Amino acid sequence: MDPLIITVAPIGAEVTKEHNPNVPYTPEEIAEECYRAWNEGASLAHIHARNPDGTSTQHPDVYARIIELVKAKTDMIIQVSVGGAVGMRVQERVGPVSLKPEMATLTCGTCNFGDGIFTNSEADIEFFAEAMKDNGVMPEFEIFEVGMIETAKKLAKKQLVELPGHFDFVMGVPGAISGDPRNLMHLVSMLPEGSTWTVAGIGRHELPLGTMAILLGGHVRVGFEDNIYYSRGVKATSNADLVARMVRLAAELGRPVASPSEARRILKLPRKQ
Ligand code: KMH
Ligand code: ZN
């Protein structure tokens, strides 16, 4: 098995300091959380950005500042979110792709997302894929339902993306695929041959699904975007706590953890930064 790539998602679009006071908002806070996670073994940073008041933004200037700060202290792979927040317009969401980061997320369909709808029409997805292609950005296919894998395959047929590729199964979002282990097995079985995958288990699903990924040869995402708890009722003090636990589990299960350069090799990232 390849070494384990640990992605840290230190903040999403939905989680707030009211949920956990350790959630980072400013570029400095976000970069510090990435740095702490990197020190523990995270090799890839999935980035969302916030305005000073804590609301979500896709503004390239804010992303640029975060990226600058993360790169100053780590050699992590930077992956920007193109999902943004529910309700954002397509033109706003695509903003950080113009910065030409190594990776960006490409959600391959629409699903319910709590009491909202995470809208990704075929035209939207193709628009994002084109933008990534134009800017030399590798997509991570975000899979919230099994049919989204078929959309990724369709994009490849249209030569908008390359397959095999790297997939992220987001499991346990209310309204989308659940965190049932059988779902993970099915998702993996549907991947194009030679693809790599990671799993982002939401809330209490983070730990069991991450453990499954370690055992199955997948990769794992942890962080406040998906889960603010270390254990039942106990809030994590930092994203680094969640990374450190995955590193310990991987060690117990005999799986080495990937450095950023190993992660680039495993993901076949076309260029180094
Ligand atoms: N905030 C969610 C609606 C991504 O980063 O690409 C979408 C999301 C996925 O977080
Ligand atoms: Zn995200």
Image: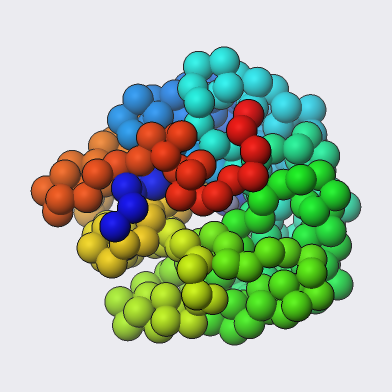
Q: Along the line of sight, which residue is nearer the eye, 174 or 127?
A: 127
Q: Along the line of sight, which residue is nearer the eye, 200 or 176?
A: 200
Left or right of 180, for residue 48:
right
Q: Quadrant of the N terminus?
A: bottom left
Task: Find residue 190 and report its horizontal and vertical position in percent.
Answer: 49, 82
Asked if residue 46 is positioned above or below residue 199 in the image, the reply reads above
Q: Indicate the colouring scheme.
A: rainbow
The extreme top residue here reads: 72
- Residue at (42, 51) in percent of width and height: 221
- Residue at (45, 78) in percent of width and height: 187
Asked if residue 2 is positioned above or below residue 177 in the image, the reply reads above
Task: Find residue 205 and report its horizontal and vertical position in percent.
Answer: 33, 64
Left or right of 14, for residue 206:
left
Asked if residue 189 is positioned above or below residue 205 in the image, the reply reads below
Q: Is residue 223 visible?
A: no
Task: Find residue 237 and report its horizontal and vertical position in percent.
Answer: 32, 32
Q: Residue 181, located in which quarter of the rendered image?
A: bottom left
- Residue at (61, 33) in percent of width and height: 272
Q: Along the line of sight, which residue is nearer the eye, 256 or 29?
A: 256
Q: Quadrant of the C terminus?
A: top right
Please give the count of numbered marks on the rendered protein: 0
Left or right of 61, for residue 256:
left
Task: Find residue 72 and report its horizontal and vertical position in percent.
Answer: 57, 15
Q: Is residue 25 visible?
A: yes
- Residue at (38, 35) in percent of width and height: 259
